[in-house]
Amino acid sequence: MQFTYKFIVITTLQTDRSIIAVLATEREAENDAFRIYLKNSNGKETDLLVQELNREIEPQIDCTSCGACCKVLMINVKKAEAQNLASYLKISETDFKNKYIEESQQGQLIINQMPCHFLEDSRCTVYEHRFTECREFPHLHRDNFKDRLFGTLIHYAMCPIIFNVVEALKTKTGFKQ
Ligand code: SF4
Ligand code: SF4
């Protein structure tokens, strides 16, 4: 499917998470329909659009006063990231792992608690040293958006970045007139 893309100017973003939660409930059927609508779209063009919207919207939303994803995501940690954060916290790597990390049988490290240990009053206390997985969520800068759409919409009610990008995408693709 080829879309006739509309020029839109995003003037007002919805950042109130309680309003977003209500709208998300109201728009469940609409989002299911949007998922089907996007299925036949050109994946590359959709990626470019999502990435453009994300570049515009993401800087306008303050993750440091949200922290919603830090309460629900299972965060994978690379060994080097664990070492880096242990060093920043001035504790040994062993103490860091004992306190904060669980290791799977395959050797995968994950933060052993949700909400994350490092979240305090909705703020990340180690923001400059946070993990790659924290930096990459909600992954709207990455290719293959359509393949991740189901997972992205699971977090639509929680994440103001996802909510606003998806809403702008509905308009830009002509789904929502
Ligand atoms: S990525 Fe989304 S859910 Fe996570 S802190 Fe930022 S706005 Fe909130
Ligand atoms: S390290 Fe910081 S950004 Fe990452 S999940 Fe924990 S509190 Fe959130």
Image (spheres, helix red, strand yellow):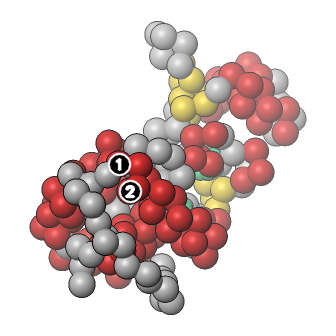
The residue lying at 18 percent from left, 60 percent from top is 37
The tag on residue 43 is 1
159 vs 162, nearest the viewer: 162
Q: Give the spatial CA distance, label 1 vs label 2.
A: 5 Å
- For label 1, the crowd category at 10 Å Cα-Cα, with few meaning under 14, some 14 to 19 and many 20 or more, is some
Q: Amino acid at mark 2?
A: Thr
Q: Give the x, y percent position of residue 162.
A: 42, 63
Q: Give the x, y percent position of residue 43.
A: 35, 48
Left or right relative to 158: residue 23: left
The residue lying at 51 percent from left, 46 percent from top is 142
Q: Give the x, y percent position of residue 30.
A: 16, 70
User: Which residue does the numbered mark 2 point to in the structure image?
Assistant: 46
Q: Is residue 38 above or below residue 116?
A: below
- For label 2, the crowd category at 10 Å Cα-Cα, with few meaning under 14, some 14 to 19 and many 20 or more, is many
Q: In the structure shown, which secondary structural element does the residue marked by tag 2 occupy?
A: helix
Q: Is residue 81 above or below residue 18?
A: above
